[in-house]
Image: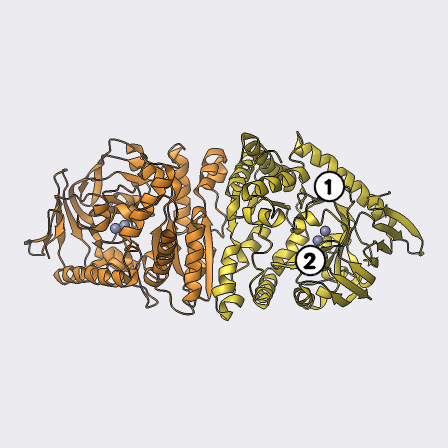
Chain colours: A yellow, B orange
Amino acid sequence: MTTAAPSGDFQAKLARYADLLVRTGVNLQPGGRVRIAAPVEATELTRLTARAAYRAGATDVRVVYTDPHLDLALYEDGTDDAVTFLPDWFARERESMVADGYAMISIVGEDPSLLAGVNPERVAARSKAQAQALKAVSEAIGGMHVNWTVAAIATPAWAARVYPQLSEAEAVARLWDDIFTTTRVNHDDPVAAWAAHTAQLRRLGELLNAKQYAAVHLTSGLGTDLTVGLAANHVWMGGGETAKNGIYAVPNLPTDEVFTAPHRDRVDGWAVASKPLSVRGQLVEGIRVRFEQGRAIEVTATRGQDTLERLIATDDGAAHLGEIALVPASAPVAQTGTLFLNTLFDENAASHIALGRCYPTNVVGGEDDATLTAAGGNDSLIHVDWMIGTPDMDVDGITAAGEREPLMRSGEWVI
Amino acid sequence: MTTAAPSGDFQAKLARYADLLVRTGVNLQPGGRVRIAAPVEATELTRLTARAAYRAGATDVRVVYTDPHLDLALYEDGTDDAVTFLPDWFARERESMVADGYAMISIVGEDPSLLAGVNPERVAARSKAQAQALKAVSEAIGGMHVNWTVAAIATPAWAARVYPQLSEAEAVARLWDDIFTTTRVNHDDPVAAWAAHTAQLRRLGELLNAKQYAAVHLTSGLGTDLTVGLAANHVWMGGGETAKNGIYAVPNLPTDEVFTAPHRDRVDGWAVASKPLSVRGQLVEGIRVRFEQGRAIEVTATRGQDTLERLIATDDGAAHLGEIALVPASAPVAQTGTLFLNTLFDENAASHIALGRCYPTNVVGGEDDATLTAAGGNDSLIHVDWMIGTPDMDVDGITAAGEREPLMRSGEWVI
Ligand SMILES: [Zn+2]
Ligand SMILES: [Zn+2]
Ligand SMILES: [Zn+2]
Ligand SMILES: [Zn+2]
């Protein structure tokens, strides 16, 4: 942290960040179109990002400003009808954008506790209705039909949750510094730094893909002892992805994970969370889950167990895994020592699993539903990442013949 | 003006204002749906308005935050293709809302000079493309297919233009005070005050409708000497309107005008502006226009003449009138003595005319295009109000038999 008030230095970094979203995040091509979704607090970054897109030759920039306080108003003052109502054209504009090949930039920065005081059943009901309405869009984005990226801004409300001991201005400045560090905006040439970083993640993915392990086995001092069977013809990915439109994009800024699709029915043992999970405005802590033949059959949490159980009850696939991701303890996010209360960051501080839907791109031919299901890929309305990695975590690959090969020792890659 | 910083008193007024938009502005019914369009600076009022709508029993509240700085980015950094490009689904969401009967609340507060430095041809080209795409929506709103209202917030940029001599905080507080005064939010019971006010405007409209004047004749010391022939079966309106869905709404907060549709081809004489006109980010001053058989044939301005000429060249109907509105010099907006640089207010400080499209509701059966055209109603992509009223203005009604009857003397109603 350098200064509490926005300085000229800050403005320069913000402009570099906007440029990074456009050039590295979605890798926008001349003549391309882009949708930017951003919280109302992000007007400054959004305007810079729109400018960067126009300068890169964008033909269209569509901005949608979001405001979670409107959701709060609905949950607190809306009728039951209002909570579940969605107009039949709710998803149509986004579906049109996917069809028209719009790149998608999402800027996030929610107060993770904004909805903490509202009835969780209302939140769950609306989340489910929205997820159903947006299923086609989510599948298209998960399947990389278009180039997309997600990045964050430091909003005052979020910063206050992350750094409750600091003043608002100091907390915001500190969180911005974390964001600029972990997204490599502090490098002289962030775009070049990202090119080198994604090449390294690609190398790890290629090594693992050549192995085609039957499973990985994860252990930690917290009690994780979990065998995660992998989907047939699974693909490990990391860094960026080439979208169906041929454009290489980096979907998450930051990203330090290498991840693939578990086999829906071949997960066994204990998974113990190494960080709190922020889900639907609630903080869930002390999670311990036992899996048997892929299904979560014992679910406990020291706080927010209701929310976790409600999440897992969303649909059948919500009790199965859709992602296993390996992240070294030396990753920049882990090095900040910050608990961000935001998956975009926290998932890059630790190896993790996700309940729910898998990414079709993590299975060869997974775009085809039947192929994905036959390979063991999981389907659900939800996809919720959940950290189990620790600095003492060991990870082995298990070959089809049952042999073990070390992948990580004491939280670090050994391949 | 009472205080520069938002006080508890300010918060109470803002909540009353939000309530007024919902109850008087669109008169939202239980189970109704509403769209709120608001600048990103208006989050506080927008959230309060959403809450007021939910408390009134709204089934759906859709908020669209707007940001004119994104337009500025486009005009400054976009390619020519980007300036004129609109996706083919551009208007579809709004068309769906009109079809579904959404009430429409628009909150305005733009910096009237934001686009002053950009190429006016770019602005004109985009404005025209958007107006064409939104023609069906504009017609539906103009024809009161749904209940809608427009009101303002005091943004820092707008306040700075209105009160350049004050500090930003003082200018914003002063402009808020103007808004609260002219929208009767300073009354103990704003909703009741509006019921009395709209009843008075309705009474004037009914008197004028019973007369069915052939024309009105306006004169002012500035040099206005204008005979405005009226459309056949014209309807004077004022205060609120009953929308096609049966709901009585007040489309403008504030509103002090009584207005109707001129006959497209029966306007003759000189119209001299009594206030600057803010159009497409440019200020046009010292306007003098001579009409002959309805058409503007001499057009001069001491500043911004180019912009005015470009506006009038939009299409054939842009050189003809679509509105004549009578406003007394004693109206609250006139009494503030403020030049708001915003039509919503300035048109309620003075009698005015509008270049371009007429309101179909100002002609009996005007919803039908052929009926409207046969009656002399004007059509255009534009509708731009333009003030000619002064405290010394006299207005006469001219009967079909050619007799004159006084309507206003020295700026005040005499009927
Ligand atoms: Zn992940
Ligand atoms: Zn994930
Ligand atoms: Zn008017
Ligand atoms: Zn008008």
Name the outermost residue toward the front: A165
**Residue B414 vs residue B188, the one in the foreground:** B188
Q: Nearer the viewer, residue B1 or B251?
A: B1
Residue A315 location, x and y as percent?
68, 68
A21 over B87 or under it: above or below? above
**Sequence order check: which comes first, mark 2 or mark 1?**
1
Left or right: A273 in relation to A131: right
Secondary structure found at label 2? strand
A59 and A65: which one is in front?
A65
Observer-nearest residue: B173 or A260? B173
Q: Position of residue B76 (x, y in %)?
A: 46, 33
Q: Circle 2 marks a residue in which chain?
A: A
Taking the spot 32% from the left edge, 44% from the top edge, the residue there is: B175
Q: Which label lies toward us, 2 or 1?
A: 1
Give the residue at mark 2.
A384
- Under mark 2, the amino acid is Val
- Image-based side of A374 in relation to B59, left or right: right
* Location of residue A359 by image quarter: bottom right
Whether the residue under disc 2 has CB within 8 Å of ligand 2: yes
Query: At 35% from the left edge and 67% from the top edge, which residue is drawn?
Result: B245
Q: Position of residue A156 (x, y in %)?
A: 55, 46
Disc 1 crowd rating (10 Å Cα; few below 14, some 14-19, many 20+) is: few
Which secondary structure, mark 1? helix
Query: What type is the residue that disc 1 sits on?
Result: Gln
- Residue at 65% x, 65% y is A307
Above or below, B244 against B339 in this view is below
User: Which quarter of the rendered picture does the C terminus of chain A lie within?
Assistant: top right
Mark 2 to mark 1 CA distance (whole Å): 23 Å
- Do the residues at discs 2 and 1 belong to one chain? yes
Q: Is residue B207 left or right of residue B54?
A: left
Q: Which residue is mark 1?
A: A335
